[in-house]
Image (cartoon, helix red, strand yellow):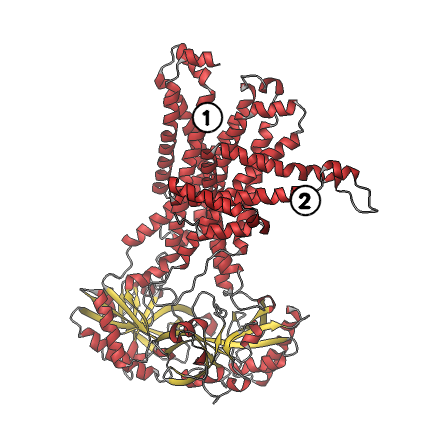
């Protein structure tokens, strides 16, 4: 049979085993045993067995080699004292016995394969949960971006606005001034995100790219696979149009053809010369998105009409700096602010920078980093709770196992063995067991992270999620295994090595079992508390998501199709030409037989993000512009409200007569009308959007309130303005339809291709799918909490059953006496069951006390569900009590079947 162990397990074995293991036949023996076991037990069981055996063999082989290399105690005693060199005599006993302890632990664990397998699998689940979460957090927050070798020396340069807020972008002329003024202290590069239409060798479509200055790769410490990067002359206006392909684009579109350098590629309908290819894996500062092409900064005005290289009022360049050797952040900060002061003096009217702030480099924005850190802590809490429950389960198993060896331990102590020596031997058994669990955890985490890395959004955004395990994750798994093994292995070792020897050496050793019974009860309470915490969080999130399906959104997203393109990234499209193309698209879409209505908007509801603008009511305008209030707004075409089925409560809808040159109009929602003109009709009232110089706008309609940014938001004020009076290139089309949506998507794509084949389609999918992106954090949290809660509940049930079963076995004599004295079997069953229920009730109280405050911190993601929701708490309580009854029933049944004569005779 040509059977091979799993690739990951073989790699792990090769990594763990020293080089001499192969020559000594360790791997060969493992492989032969694997083949034999595969024939009799199947692949899955054999793969797990091989992984555990490889880990155990690695530990045993390494320690034996170390022990064999050390001189024996007798030899060391005859060694002469060599000057001031420290004698190894104090270390000798440890090394002499460590390998022996490991071999003994291996024999003990092999004698109980069922115990070893169950305990190792339990630990693999717990450690695997935390390792998986750590790997995700490591990829997002800790792991340096691929190819950025100078990341430790990188800093972010953020501009400070007049109101004290900071931005990541600056005007290109200011970037040049900062680069020249701080060149002795830092290397300053500039880049800007660019979505472009690329026509390559095999395909065309929307591609994420970057505009970059010539020194960007030098600042990042990145290499090229082919060709060159940009030169200083290509940062200027009128420079030749050149592009550097990403390694992925080069592989996909050009088949890794090394002669690609020098070819021409059309980007936004302009011919670019390919001058290089980046190294594999490099994606720049945005590590979660696939970057297709890098463009010289000098090409910005050619392909993007709104990106000017000479305008100081337009901020679109994102600076990235590398501190030179010996330069601190404070020194760089001072140098940048000197330049900022000089720029404000030289250009007082059109310079937006009011200072510079230097921050450590992170791949995420400060706001995103804060959010990711908060979510990471929450996920670690969930996975850590699962690990705690699993470790307690194994700790309880180890305690029971240690008690069965009580006489053995007592005899060793009576014969003169040091208590420390016995504790160490028991602790090594625990550590070997936990290390076997860590091996299984790596296999579980490797599989789960592979699934997570394959996730893609429902819209055409090229995500690159790499949650794969690296050395940090492996070290983390090892550290978790060692720490938990020490904590939960030391407790049974301390308990079992502390008996009354006279009592322990007798057949009856009940005098000291009460302490351990209380310890097991504490273990169960902690397990139930953790399970209650997980289940309450999962239940609240699940109830919240269920509420979203029945929630009143204020609009109907069903049977609405979402279609968007990237007109705003094309130099050839102004607001007017984009408007014409959008009208042509709508005219052809409405002619399709399955389309009922079509509309355009710059902000579809509940799709992340949004737009806000300052406003005032004439005659009530604050004197200072900064005192004006803000309101969310959207630009829409007629039929927008019909497409989303938003009722118009007062007034009228927009019409084709609401165009440029006609009186400016707006439609507001109920919240805006009631807050701005309480007790009055909003029709005919006037508002001003923007600044005091902007014209007044008449309110011609009031629509029903809706959800706009998130489903859990408080009611927002909202203003709609007609598209014809505020032309905008960045628009999406929504279409209400009946029939086959897949066919509709293909028809819309063909229509856009017929209007302009160079315009890339950004999204072409169901509106509910797009709206679902806003629900991804809640859905992911619900899924993880549910999985963790289910695992925790199962482990807690096993732990409760184990404690009660062991307690019943230890109380066999008591139950026999009770039966002999006439106790009814129902009373005995009730007594055992109530013992389990009491433990669960205590755990419930603690778990609920922890879960409700935690859920209160996540109120915004619960969509109207209270953290103390009685339905959720009551349901979880019933589930756990039901589990307690179920886990207690079998031990209770065993107690009532006790034969009093046999029980008394056994004692």
Q: Is residue 266 left or right of residue 490?
A: left
Relative height, residue 574 to residue 878 (above, below): below
> Is residue 292 shown above or below 479?
below
Give how far across and how far down residue 277 sits, in percent: 47, 76
Which residue is depicted at the point 43% across and 36% down? 796
| Extreme residue toward the bottom, this view | 238
604 left or right of 300? left
Q: Is residue 776 above or below residue 197?
A: above
Residue 128 position, x and y percent, is 47, 47
Instruction: Judge left or right: residue 846 versus residue 429.
Output: left
**One can see residue 490 in this view:** no
Q: Which mark is residue 555?
A: none
Residue under the image location 40 percent in, 54 percent down = 860
Q: Nearer the viewer, residue 389 or 354?
A: 389
Kind of element beneath mark 1: helix
Instruction: Using the rendered image of the protein, determine whether residue 671 is visible from the camera's viewpoint.
Output: yes
Residue 56 pos. (x, y %)? 53, 42
Closest to the observer, 895 or 55: 55
Q: Nearer the viewer, mark 1 or mark 2?
A: 2
Q: Disc 1 to disc 2, how far (Cα)?
A: 45 Å
Q: Which quadrant of the view contains residue 188?
A: bottom right
Could you tell me which residue is drawn at 40 percent across and 10 percent down?
Answer: 820
Seen as rendered, the residue at the extreme left is: 593
Reading the chain from its start, which is encountered first: label 1 or label 2? Answer: 2
Residue 5 versus residue 302: which sits nearer the camera?
Answer: 5
Pointer 2 residue: 69
Q: How many marks?
A: 2
Mark 1, residue position = 806
Could you tell me residue 762's position as x and y percent? 33, 71
């Amino acid at each position: 049979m040509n059977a091979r162990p799993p690739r990951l397990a073989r790699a792990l074995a090769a990594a763990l085993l020293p080089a001499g293991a192969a020559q000594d036949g360790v791997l060969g023996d493992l492989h032969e045993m694997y083949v034999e076991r595969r024939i009799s037990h199947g692949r899955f069981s054999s793969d797990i067995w091989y992984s555990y055996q490889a880990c155990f063999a690695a530990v045993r082989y390494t320690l034996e080699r170390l022990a064999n290399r050390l001189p024996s105690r007798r030899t060391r005693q005859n060694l002469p004292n060599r000057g001031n060199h420290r004698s190894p005599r104090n270390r000798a006993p440890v090394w002499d016995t460590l390998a022996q302890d490991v071999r003994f632990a291996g024999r003990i664990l092999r004698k109980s394969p069922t115990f070893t397998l169950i305990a190792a699998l339990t630990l693999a689940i717990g450690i695997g949960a935390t390792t998986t979460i750590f790997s995700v957090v490591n990829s997002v927050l800790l792991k340096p971006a691929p190819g950025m070798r100078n990341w430790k020396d990188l800093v972010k340069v953020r501009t400070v606005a007049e109101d004290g807020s900071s931005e990541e972008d600056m005007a290109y002329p200011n970037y040049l001034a900062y680069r020249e003024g701080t060149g002795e202290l830092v290397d300053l590069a500039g880049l800007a995100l660019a979505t472009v239409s690329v026509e390559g060798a095999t395909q065309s479509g929307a591609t994420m790219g970057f505009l970059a200055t010539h020194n960007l790769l030098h600042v990042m410490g990145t290499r090229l696979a082919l060709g060159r990067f940009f030169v200083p002359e290509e940062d200027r206006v009128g420079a030749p149009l050149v592009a550097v392909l990403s390694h992925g684009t080069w592989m996909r579109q050009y088949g890794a053809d090394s002669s690609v350098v020098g070819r021409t590629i059309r980007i936004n309908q302009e011919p670019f010369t390919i001058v290089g290819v980046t190294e594999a894996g490099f994606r720049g500062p945005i590590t979660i998105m696939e970057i297709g092409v890098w463009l010289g900064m000098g090409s910005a005005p050619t392909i993007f009409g709104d990106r000017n290289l000479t305008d100081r009022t337009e901020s679109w360049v994102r600076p990235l700096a590398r501190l030179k050797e010996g330069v601190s952040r404070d020194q760089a900060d001072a140098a940048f602010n000197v330049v900022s002061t000089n720029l404000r003096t030289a250009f007082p009217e059109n310079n937006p920078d009011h200072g510079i702030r230097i921050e450590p480099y992170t791949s995420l924005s400060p706001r995103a980093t804060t959010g990711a850190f908060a979510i990471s802590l929450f996920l670690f809490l969930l996975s850590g709770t699962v690990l705690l429950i699993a470790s307690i389960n194994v700790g309880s198993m180890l305690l029971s196992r240690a008690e069965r060896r009580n006489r053995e331990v007592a005899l060793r102590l009576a014969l003169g063995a040091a208590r420390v020596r016995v504790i160490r031997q028991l602790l090594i058994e625990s550590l070997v067991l936990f290390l076997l669990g860590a091996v299984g955890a790596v296999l579980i985490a490797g599989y789960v992270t592979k699934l997570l890395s394959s996730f893609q959004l429902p819209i055409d955004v090229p995500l690159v999620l790499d949650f794969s395990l690296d050395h940090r994750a492996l070290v983390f798994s090892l550290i978790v295994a060692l720490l938990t093994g020490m904590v939960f292995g030391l407790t049974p070792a301390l308990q079992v090595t502390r008996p009354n020897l006279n009592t322990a050496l007798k057949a009856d050793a009940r005098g000291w079992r009460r302490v351990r019974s209380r310890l097991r009860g504490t273990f169960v309470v902690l397990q139930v508390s953790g399970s209650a915490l997980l289940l309450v969080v999962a239940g609240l999130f699940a109830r919240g998501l269920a509420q979203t399906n029945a929630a009143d959104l204020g609009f109907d997203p069903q049977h609405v199709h979402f279609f968007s393109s990237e007109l705003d990234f094309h130099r050839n499209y102004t607001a007017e030409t984009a408007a014409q193309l959008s009208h042509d698209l709508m005219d052809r879409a409405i002619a399709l037989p399955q389309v009922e209505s079509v509309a355009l908007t710059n902000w579809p509801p509940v799709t992340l993000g949004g737009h806000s603008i300052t406003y005032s009511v004439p005659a009530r305008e604050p004197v200072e512009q900064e005192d004006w209030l803000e309101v969310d707004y959207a630009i829409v075409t007629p039929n927008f409200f019909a497409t989303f089925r938003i009722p118009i409560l007062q007034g009228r809808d927009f019409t084709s007569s609401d165009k440029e040159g006609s009186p400016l109009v707006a439609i507001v929602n109920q919240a805006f009308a009631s807050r701005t003109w309480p007790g009055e009709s909003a029709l005919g009232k006037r508002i001003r959007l923007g600044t005091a110089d902007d014209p007044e706008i008449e309110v011609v309609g009031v629509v029903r309130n809706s959800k706009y940014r998130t489903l859990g938001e408080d009611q927002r004020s909202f203003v709609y303005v007609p598209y014809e009076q505020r032309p905008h290139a960045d628009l999406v089309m929504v279409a209400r339809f009946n029939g086959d949506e897949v066919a509709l998507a293909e028809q819309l794509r063909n229509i856009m291709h017929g209007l302009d084949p160079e315009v890339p389609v950004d999204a072409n999918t169901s509106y509910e799918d797009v709206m679902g992106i806003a629900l991804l954090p809640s859905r992911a949290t619900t899924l993880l909490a549910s999985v963790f809660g289910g695992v925790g509940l199962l482990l807690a049930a096993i732990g409760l059953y184990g404690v009660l079963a062991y307690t019943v076995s230890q109380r066999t004599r008591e139950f026999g006496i009770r039966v002999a004295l006439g106790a009814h079997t129902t009373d005995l069953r009730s007594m055992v069951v109530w013992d389990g229920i009491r433990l669960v009730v205590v755990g419930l109280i603690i778990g609920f006390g922890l879960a409700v405050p935690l859920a209160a911190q996540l109120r915004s993601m619960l969509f109207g569900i209270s953290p103390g929701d009685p339905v959720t708490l009551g349901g979880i309580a019933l589930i756990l009590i039901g589990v307690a009854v179920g886990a207690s029933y079998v031990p209770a049944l065993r107690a009532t079947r006790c034969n009093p004569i046999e029980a008394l005779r056994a004692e």
